[in-house]
Image (cartoon, rainbow, N blue to C red):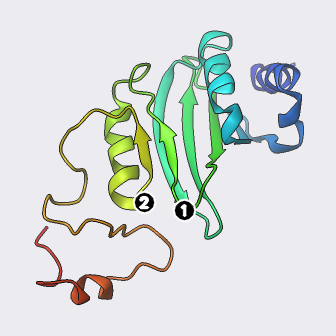
């Protein structure tokens, strides 16, 4: 059995609810989708037991009816797990910061705040990223249905980038 197959088997054995949502998508990549409530236990298991100790990226998505956040974690042997977390609320989306584990997550989490309006509990105060400081509050350009026309309706039009 290959490392990727063992990893998938271990993940499903520990979290049987993931069996239908976990698949090997490439010879070094596992994709799994989990509900928000399972994020912390699965995340910690991947870090401590399966040694996925490299954060590659965090990706936020507006899927019209829900928001999701994908954590791309890797091991030194180049196996990657993409952990898609379905957020509990579309109206007030939030996640908890992982900067205590991965300080570099700060930049990704700021993108979630600025571009999608996902609140990140525990994220320390800091500069906006990647939008300019004068970008209008409540305008999230990666949300479905958002258009630049919304900025024209605001006072002064679009901010300078």
Displayed quadrant of residue 78: top right
> Please, what secondary structure does the residue beneath circle 1 have?
loop
According to the picture, the residue beneath numbered tag 2 turns out to be 116
Task: Give the image location of residue 158, x and y in percent.
Answer: 17, 79
In the image, is residue 159 above or below residue 66?
below
Residue 91: numbered disc: 1
What residue do we see at 47% from left, 42% from top?
58
Image quarter (top left, top right, bottom left or bottom right) of the N terminus: top right
Q: Between residue 124 and residue 109, name the one nearer to us.
A: 124
Task: Give the image location of residue 128, x and y in percent.
Answer: 21, 50
Task: Give the image location of residue 39, x and y in percent.
Answer: 64, 32
Would you say 149 lies left or right of 58 here? left
Image quarter (top left, top right, bottom left or bottom right) of the C terminus: bottom left
In the image, is residue 52 above or below residue 125?
above
In the image, is residue 145 above or below residue 106?
below
What residue do we see at 68% from left, 23% from top?
41
> Please, what secondary structure does the residue beneath circle 2 have?
helix
Closest to the camera, between mark 2 and mark 1, is 1
Q: Sequence-wise, which precedes: disc 2 or disc 1?
A: 1
Q: Residues within 10 Å of mark 1 (few under 14, many from 20)?
A: few
Would you say 56 lies left or right of 150 here? right
What residue do we see at 61% from left, 10% from top?
48
Displayed quadrant of residue 74: top right
Q: Between residue 134 and residue 142, name the one nearer to us.
A: 134
What's the distance in space between the residues labelled 2 and 1, CA to CA?
12 Å
Q: Between residue 81 and residue 124, name the one nearer to us.
A: 124
Q: Residues within 10 Å of mark 2 (few under 14, many from 20)?
A: many
Displayed quadrant of residue 76: top right
Task: Give the image location of residue 157, x and y in percent.
Answer: 16, 84
What residue do we see at 51% from left, 74% from top?
144
In the image, is residue 25 above or below residue 16?
below
Seen from this angle, which residue lies furthest top?
Answer: 49
């Amino acid at each position: 059995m290959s490392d990727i197959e063992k990893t998938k088997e271990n993940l499903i054995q520990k979290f049987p609810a993931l069996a239908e949502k976990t698949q090997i998508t490439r010879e070094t990549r596992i994709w799994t989708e989990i509900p928000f409530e399972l994020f912390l236990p699965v995340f910690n298991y991947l870090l401590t037991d399966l040694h996925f100790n490299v954060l590659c990226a965090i990706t936020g998505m507006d899927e019209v009816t829900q928001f999701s956040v994908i954590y791309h974690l890797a091991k030194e042997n180049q196996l990657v797990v993409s952990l898609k977390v379905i957020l509990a609320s579309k109206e007030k989306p939030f996640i908890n910061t992982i900067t205590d584990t991965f300080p570099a997550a700060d930049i990704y989490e700021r993108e979630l705040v600025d571009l999608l309006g996902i609140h990140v509990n525990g994220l320390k105060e800091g500069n906006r990223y990647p939008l300019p400081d004068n970008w209008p509050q409540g305008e999230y350009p990666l949300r479905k249905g958002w258009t630049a026309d919304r900025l024209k309706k605001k006072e002064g039009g679009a901010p300078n980038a």
